[in-house]
Structure formats: C-alpha cells, structure tokens
C-alpha cells in the first residue's frame, strides 16, 4: 500500500506507461495533483489489516486537509481474517474518514481487482467508481450466496463489471485495464475542481460560444412519439462535441454527462427518448439525483434537457418506493445552488415536469423549443380520461383541440413558467450567455446541522 505525503502528492503525468501517444499528451496537458492511495491485491490478495486501514484514513484526512481529490486504487479481498476484530475496527476508521471527505473533495475509486465486503462498501462511499473489466466487487461473495440461498454463482455474475455497469449502477466508468483507468481519471479530473472552495479549471477551446446549432433541432422526429438519441443533442451543444458520460449503461432512460460550454465545466442531465420513451423510473431518479447532488457539491453548473412523458407506471415501481426515489430527484434539484439552465426540447408532462428542474423548482433560466409540450399529460391521455364515452371522431377532435390550447410552450411562457421560446439554432448561444451571466452566482442555504435527504 502506498500513499502520497502532503508534500509529495501524486502527479498524474507519471501514471500512464505504454499508452497511446494521444493519451500521453492528454496527461501532459492537465497538471493535476491528487492524494493517491493504492491497495495492492498482489500482496495477500489485498487483505486490509488494521494498520492498512489507518493508512487509508490518513490519506482521506490528508486529502481533506489539503483540499485535493482523493483517489483510491482498490484491489482487496476484505478485512484481514487473521487480525479479527482489530481489522474491522480499522475498516470503520477508514470508512469514517472517507465519509468526512464527502462534499469537501471529490473521492474517486479505481477498482483493479477484487473488492469484497468492507472494501466494497468503501467503494459505495466514493463519488465516482472506475472499474477495470476484470475486476469485481460484492459485499457477500458466491460462497455465502450458495450457502444461504443454494444458488451457485460466479464472481463475475455476482459482482463483475457487467453487473455493476447495467444492474447496480455502482460502476461510473468501465475501462479495459489500469492504464485506461488512469486516462479516464485524468479526463474526469478535467471537469472537477480540487475541492468545494474552487471552481473547475477552464478548458481552452476554439469552439465559439456563438456557434449556431440548427442540427440539434433537426434531430426532432416529425411525431411526438418518435425517438432520437439525446446524446447527439448534448454533443452538438458541447464544446468540440465532446462529453464524458457517467453511468452510461445503467438507467439508460436518463443521461448524465460532463461537457464544457465556452470552456466551463457543465453537468448535463437529459431524458433519453430511446429508452423507455424517456420516462422516469426508480434507477433513473437515483442516477439523476446523485449526479445533480455531486455537481452541486463541487460548483459545477447544471444543464437539464427535458423530453419525458412522465413517470413510468406500474405497481412494481410503486411498491418498490417510486415516491421515495422520485423524491430524491426533487430534493436534489430543490437544494441545488449552482447555476441551473433548463431547456425543454419536447414533452414535459405531469410530475416529471416538476422534477426535471422546472421553473418553480428554482432554475435560473428555463428555455423551450417550439416543439415543447408542457401540460399535466399528453392529448391522448387526457382524451382517454375526459372523453371515455366519446366516439373515436369526437375523441380525435378533442385531442387536436387539447394540443392546440394546452400543449404549446407559448402559453407557459405567457404565465412565466418558461423564460423564452427559442429557435433550436440559438440554444448553445443562449446557454453560454446564461452561464457567463451566472458565473458569480452565490446562494446561501439556511443554517442547519444537515438536511435529511430522502434516501
């Protein structure tokens, strides 16, 4: 196990060996320092002794005291069995120190081997988790699963990268190997500040903030039920069409990504019509809420792109706590104090309209495209409820009248719920101007011990 001392924190320039030249240049372009700690799985499978956990705690305290990101490279089979309760005591000490970093410095874990039991929970405390394809993590391993449930399962099936990328959402990024993990780490740090008292570094770009984006509007289908890839919209709006997507394979009905606009780091939350029609379910609410909270903690402005018909219906979701988890997203936006810009691309119905950073949730600027539809529900849904006994012809006429009277964005704009209806070609320019205006925004929250987020 190694740790950088306060006077000699690890410089990422030394990290990649044998990587492609483009990646090496990227490392050279971003001189960032971190407090680095490495749990080496090649030594007794990385078993954590009490002393080793104390070193992890020391690393976390060092990162917090010096205002530097904490990066853990983790490969551990768990607490050292030979030390007994002393090893568990040490793990608790490490966990508390890492938790104390929350919201003060970014905490990032690179999983390079096994992460079992206690070390797996340390991963759960991290802001971002990067997993190599051959790593795995779980709290209770295959042996215990087989003993208690009778189900035989492999390490990979139980806690491999596939499971954590698609099912649990633990893996923020999945990469091929350790070298690729270090490149991904460097890319991530480009969007993050060192600590809560700083802003993310400005990235040089030749992409003008005045660039027009007519191709973004051209992506909209001719019908309200047609799908498109919202990632393409995000790339068109971003500097140089580059973005770093977080948790790409989990809850794919919502996209969370980092971009820069006019060189400034921005966190993007967007509904994805290609998955579940862009509806919000429990995983999507959790994913978006966690990302919004992270961006708000580290002074990263938020851009929300809205195109959702509402929450996904079903008794299973309700029984599993859709109310609680939907509340997480409401809560995350409601307490966010960073600059917030919302652009309604198309559908914005019902409760999902509220939770996707609507005007009354406190955003700084709410824009809408002419294709936007803001209402309690869509015309077809309204007709199904209000015209149950009508003939098909009467219902069709009602839908057309409802769409004309309620579903256009100009009505919302007249009432102040939308600040402006804009041409899609002007979207990047409007967002860049708003973020420049809001750069000095500072909002103080009421004094309290801490909030009580609906976990």
Image (cartoon, rainbow, N blue to C red):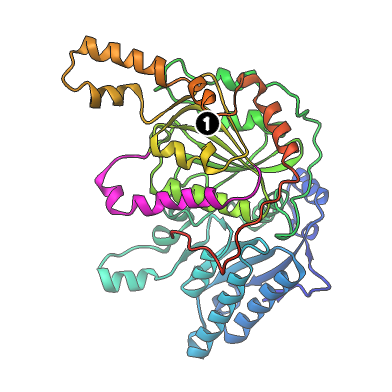
Q: Quadrant of the N terminus?
A: bottom right
Q: At 64% from the left edge and 67% from the top edge, which residue is drawn?
A: 72
Q: Which residue is mark 1?
A: 417
Task: Report the quarter where the C terminus lies.
Answer: bottom left
Residue 7 vertical position relative to residue 364 in the rendered view, above or below? below
Above or below residue 278? Residue 11 is below
Q: Position of residue 252 (x, y in %)?
A: 46, 41
- Decide if residue 209 is on the left or right side of residue 138: right
Most extreme residue toward the left is 389
The residue under the point 48% across, 21% down is 411
In the image, residue 113 lies at what x, y percent?
55, 65
Does 294 sit above or below residue 341? Answer: below
Q: Residue at x 48, y 60 (%)?
A: 453
Q: Quadrant of residue 153?
A: bottom left
Q: Main secondary structure of the magenta part?
A: helix
Q: Is residue 173 visible?
A: no
Picture quadrant where residue 324 is located:
bottom left
Rendered location of residue 425, percent (x, y): 65, 19
Residue situated furthest front in the rendering: 415
The residue under the point 53% across, 48% down is: 333
Label 1 environment density (alpha carbons within 10 Å; few <14, some 14–19, many ≥20):
some
Using the image as rendered, state which of residue 183 and residue 156 is in the foreground. 183
* 371 to the left or right of 208: left
Q: Is residue 225 left or right of residue 150?
A: right
- Identify which residue, 180 or 37, lies in the foreground: 37
Q: Is residue 326 magenta?
A: yes
Residue 355 lies in the magenta-colored region? no
Q: Which residues are magenta?
A: 311-339
Q: Is residue 261 visible?
A: yes
């Amino acid at each position: 196990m190694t740790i950088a001392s306060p006077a000699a924190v690890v410089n990422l320039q030394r990290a990649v060996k044998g990587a492609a030249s483009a990646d090496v240049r990227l490392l050279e372009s971003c001189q960032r320092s971190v407090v680095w700690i490495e749990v080496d799985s090649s030594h007794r499978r990385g078993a954590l002794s009490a002393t080793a956990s104390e070193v992890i705690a020391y690393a976390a305290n060092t990162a917090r005291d010096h205002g530097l990101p904490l990066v853990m490279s983790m490969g551990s089979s768990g607490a050292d069995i030979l030390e007994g309760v002393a090893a568990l005591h040490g793990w608790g000490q490490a966990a508390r120190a890492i938790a104390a970093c929350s919201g003060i410095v970014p905490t990032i874990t690179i999983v390079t081997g096994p992460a079992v039991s206690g070390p797996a929970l340390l991963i759960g405390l991290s802001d971002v988790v990067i997993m190599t394809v051959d790593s795995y993590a779980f709290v209770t391993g295959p042996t215990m699963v087989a003993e208690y449930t009778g189900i035989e399962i492999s390490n990979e099936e139980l806690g491999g990268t596939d499971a954590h990328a698609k099912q649990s959402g633990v893996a923020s990024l999945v990469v091929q190997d350790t070298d690729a993990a270090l490149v991904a780490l460097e890319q991530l740090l480009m969007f993050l500040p060192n600590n809560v008292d700083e802003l993310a570094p400005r990235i040089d770009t030749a992409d003008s903030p005045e660039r027009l984006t007519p191709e973004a509007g051209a992506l909209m289908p001719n019908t309200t039920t047609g799908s498109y890839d919202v990632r393409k919209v995000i790339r068109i709006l971003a500097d140089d069409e580059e973005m770093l997507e977080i948790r790409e394979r989990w809850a794919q009905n919502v996209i969370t990504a980092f971009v820069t606009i006019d060189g400034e780091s921005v966190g993007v939350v967007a509904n994805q019509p290609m998955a579940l029609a862009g509806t919000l379910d429990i995983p999507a609410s959790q994913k978006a809420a966690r990302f919004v909270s992270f961006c708000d903690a580290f002074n990263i402005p938020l851009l929300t792109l809205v195109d959702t018909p509402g929450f996904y219906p079903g008794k299973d979701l309700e029984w599993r706590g859709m109310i609680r988890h939907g509340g997480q997203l409401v809560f995350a936006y409601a307490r966010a104090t960073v600059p917030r810009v919302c652009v309604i691309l198309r559908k914005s119905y019902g409760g999902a309209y509220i939770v996707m950073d609507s005007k009354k949730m406190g955003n700084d600027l709410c824009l809408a495209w002419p294709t936007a539809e803001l209402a309690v529900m869509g015309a077809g849904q309204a007709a199904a409820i209000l015209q149950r006994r009508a003939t098909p012809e009467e219902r069709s006429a009602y839908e057309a009248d409802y769409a004309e009277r309620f579903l256009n964005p100009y009505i919302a704009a007249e009432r102040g719920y939308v600040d402006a209806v804009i041409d899609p070609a002007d979207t990047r320019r409007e967002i860049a101007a708003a973020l420049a205006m809001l750069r000095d925004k500072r909002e103080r929250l009421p004094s309290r011990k801490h909030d009580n987020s609906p976990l």
